[in-house]
Image: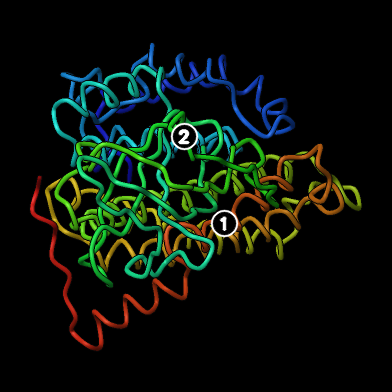
Amino acid sequence: MNKYFFTEEHELFRQSLRAFLDKEVRPNIEQWEADGQIPRAIFKRFGEMGFMGVTYPEKYGGMGLDTFFAVVYTEEMIRMNSSGFNTSIGAHAGLALAHMNAEGTEAQKQKYLTAGLKGELIGCLAITEPSGGSDVASISTKAVRDGDYLVINGAKTFISNGVLSDYIVAAVRTGGPGAKGISMVIIDRDTPGVSATALKKMGWHASDTGEIAFDNVRIPVENILGDENKGFFYIMQHFASERLAMALIGVAQSQLALDLAVDYMAEREVFGRPINKFQVLRHRVAQLSSETMCARAFVYSLYRQYSQGDYIIKEAAMAKLVATQLSDKVCYECMRFFGGYGYMESYPMARLLRDSQLGTIGGGTSEVLCEIISKMTIDAKSYKAAVPH
C-alpha cells in the first residue's frame, strides 16, 4: 500500500529520520521516562536537523515538505515507544507552532516560529481548563482589556510542556459567552503572575504535563494571535489536523504492538514449539493485522484529502474514534501474547499499553467525537473553516 502514498523521497527521509532517532533518542528513552521530561538539548538537535519543522515554510527555518513527510515523521517517532517523548516534541512543533504559523503576524513568526523551529524557544498550547476540556466554547479564563494590555485570570490543565515551555499559546475569553468570545494569545513564561504545577500521569511519563495558573497576568494587546474573538474557530480548524494525527498515532501504535508481538512469538516456546504455531494466536494476529491495515488505509486517504485542502472535520473525528480505540484493543491483546512478561516494566508492552490509553481522551474523547459525528450525520450540521488571518 505504501507505494500509493509514498515516493522514493519519502522513504529516503524515513531512513534518515530513523537513523537519527536510533542514535539520538532510543538510547535515552529509559532515562527520560524516569526523569518525567525530555531535555532541552534534544529540541535543539531536532532543530539543527530540520526535523522540528518538516512541513513549515523554509522562510522560517522549516523544510517546506509535503504532508506525507509529516506522516513518515509521526510513524517513525512512534517506533521509539514513548508517547511522552513524542508528545513533548509534538506539543511544541505540532500544536503551539501550528497556531503561530497559521495565525501569527510576521513579527510574531519572526520571534516565536523561527526560534521554535530551531528548538531554542519551546511552546505549549493551553486550551483545557480544570472545569472542562472538549467544550471549548465554555472556557472561563478571562482576558480583560486595560488600555494597551490584556489582564488574564484563570487556569489551564493537562497541558503538555506546561511547566518547562518558554511561552504559552492560550485560549482566553476576550468577549461575551460562547464560541464568539474567545481569542488566542501568546503569554511569555516569565510574565509576572504565571505559575505552573507538574502533574503525575499513568502513562506518557517522558512528557512534562502541567496545570498553569494566571493571576492578573498582563500582556500587550499585540500578543493576540489572529483576529480577536476568532479563537474558537482557529481551534476547531486545528482540531481536524490534531485528530487526524492522533488517528495516525493510533495506527502506528497498533502496528508497533503487532511487530513486537510477532517477534516475541517467534522466540517464545511452549510445549516444545514457538507460540506462533498455535492457531488461536495466529488467527488473533491475523484479525488484529487486518483491522490495523483497514484503519491505516482510511487514515492515509484522509491525509491525501487534507493535503489537497479539504476541510475534514467529520472524517478526522471518525478516524480518531476508530484508530485510537483500535490501538487500545491491539495493545491489550498483544500484551497478553507476552504472558507474564507483558506485565513487566522491563518489556516494551507495559509502556505501550499505558501510553495508548490517552488516545481516546486527548484531542476530544471518544464520546465527544461520537456526538460531533452524530450531529453531522443525523442532524446535518456543518462546520465552516475559519477565514485565514
CB contact under 8 Å: marks 1 and 2 = no
Quarter of the figure with residue 180: bottom left
Q: Classify mark 1: helix, strand or loop.
A: helix
Q: Classify mark 2: helix, strand or loop.
A: loop
Q: What residue type is labelled 1?
A: Leu
Q: Which of 27 and 281 is in front in this view?
A: 27
Mark 1, residue position: 358
Label 1 crowding class (10 Å Cα cut-off): few <14, some 14-19, many 20+?
Answer: some
Number of dots carrying numbers? 2
Which residue is pictured at 35% across the width and 24% down the height?
A: 116
Q: In the current view of this chain or complex, which residue is farthest to the top?
A: 48
Alpha-carbon distance for marks 1 and 2? 32 Å
Q: What residue type is labelled 2?
A: Pro
Mark 2, residue position: 192
Q: Can residue 31 be seen in this view?
A: yes
Q: Which of 371 and 316 is in front in this view?
A: 371
Left or right of 334? Residue 216 is: left
Q: Does residue 271 lie above or below 9 as drawn?
A: below
Q: Residue 247, image x and y in percent?
A: 41, 55
Q: In the current view of this chain or complex, which residue is farthest to the right?
A: 271
Quarter of the figure with residue 230: bottom left
